[in-house]
Image (tube, helix red, strand yellow):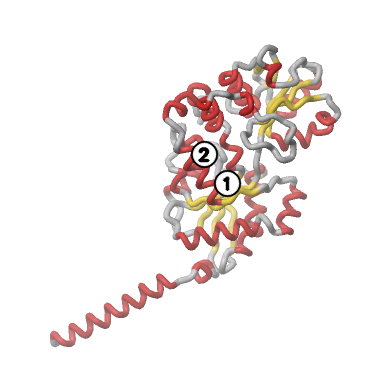
Amino acid sequence: MTSRSLTSLGAFVLLALCGLCSFARAETVEEFYRGKQVRLVLGHDVGGDYDLGGRLLGRYLGRYIPGAPTIVVQNMPGANSLVATNFLFNVAPKDGTVIGSFSRNIPGDAVRGLRNLNADPKRFGWIGATSRPGRICIARSDSGVSSVTDLLSKELIVGGTGTGGVQSFVPNVVNKVLNTRFKVVEGYKGYADLIVAMERGEISGVCHVTDILMSSQGDAIRAGKYRILFNTEETPNADMPEVDSIFKYVANERHKQVLRLLFNSSEFGRPYAVPPDVPEDRLAALRAAFDATVKDPEFLEEAKRLKLDVTPSAGKDLQKAVEQLNAIPKDVIEAANEILPPQR
């Protein structure tokens, strides 16, 4: 073959390769997703709120992703969702065909140096979150404690289910930051046992997730049997603006930073993210699909039947929240870890 022929052949091959490259670059999001399956990996067991919320999202999300892919839900429990988190970061394809949901505590745990967490939340592509799982503490009206101010001088006996549970860690954290006088009695099996103990007078109060407390004890609270002492969110709760935030009683900015770090999980709700390095156009499409899904009337009606809070947070807001967590000074992180060492 002559040199001219070789040159012509080389030019033809180069043009063909360039054509393939151009085709790959020109593939739209719709073309990519059409006919594909998207795995929605849930880092929790079947039956809990993460599972119910994830399966509900999966039934609707595909409608709004360009190309209408099929959403397939896969539970991947283990170590309170560490298994799923590490899988999403290190193993899952980085092309937008896998979405993960894991514990709302993961972003804060990463900042605090949780062992066995092999993921950097700053690098996830955050799609959005549902739910705003606030926390409140309540007391019996005959306890003599009706406010945070009372707690500074009067003891309030509350029940706990273990140091990692919300019922225990909220009063313990507030005691150490504000010198309140919660006395936590451990050993209760769960929330139902705590309510029975409070009704019997064994304990005088309990701290728990706002929605659960209000759904089960709302009538008793409205009747004056129990009083809400405070919530743990810095942003006021629109449904109960009369309830004080614990941040109202914290004058020291460093102490506020400690509380923000320890109580940050509320703003992450039930989060959804994709692995690092997913193409920007696909991430943008998934974010837009999520935003549309959480406004879908059928989706909202089904969530209501399931008694699921779907108060949404946008992906960009979650990204910003992660960045703010990572800007917390090292001495504040150390102080937070002294108060509440990472549990897992």
Residue 162 visible in image: no
Residue at disc 2, secondary structure? helix
Pointer 2 residue: 106
Q: Quadrant of residue 103?
A: top right
Residue 151 seen anywhere in this rendered image of the structure: yes
Q: Is residue 334 above or below residue 40?
A: above
In the image, is residue 203 above or below residue 322?
above
User: Mark 1 packing: few (<14 Cα in 10 Å), some, or many (20+)?
Assistant: many
Q: Is residue 288 left or right of residue 158?
A: left
Nearer the N terminus, badge 1 or badge 2? 2
Image quarter where the N terminus lies is bottom left
CB-based contact (under 8 Å), mark 1 and mark 2: yes
The residue where tag 1 is placed is 271
Residue 270, by quadrant, is top right
Residue sitting at 22 percent across and 80 percent down?
Answer: 10
Q: How many residues crowd around disc 2 within 10 Å: few (fewer than 14), some, or many (20 or more)?
A: many
Indicate the amino acid at tag 2: Ile
* Percent position of residue 223, x then y: 86, 28
The residue furthest front is: 251
Give the percent coordinates (x, y) of residue 332. Answer: 46, 27
Q: Position of residue 245 (x, y in %)?
A: 66, 30
- Which residue is rendered at x = 73% and y = 36% of the image? 241
Q: Quadrant of residue 298?
A: bottom right
Q: Which residue is pictured at 77% across the width and 50% down the height?
A: 305
For the residues labelled 1 and 2, the Cα–Cα distance comes to 10 Å
Who's the residue at 56% across and 57% down the image? 287
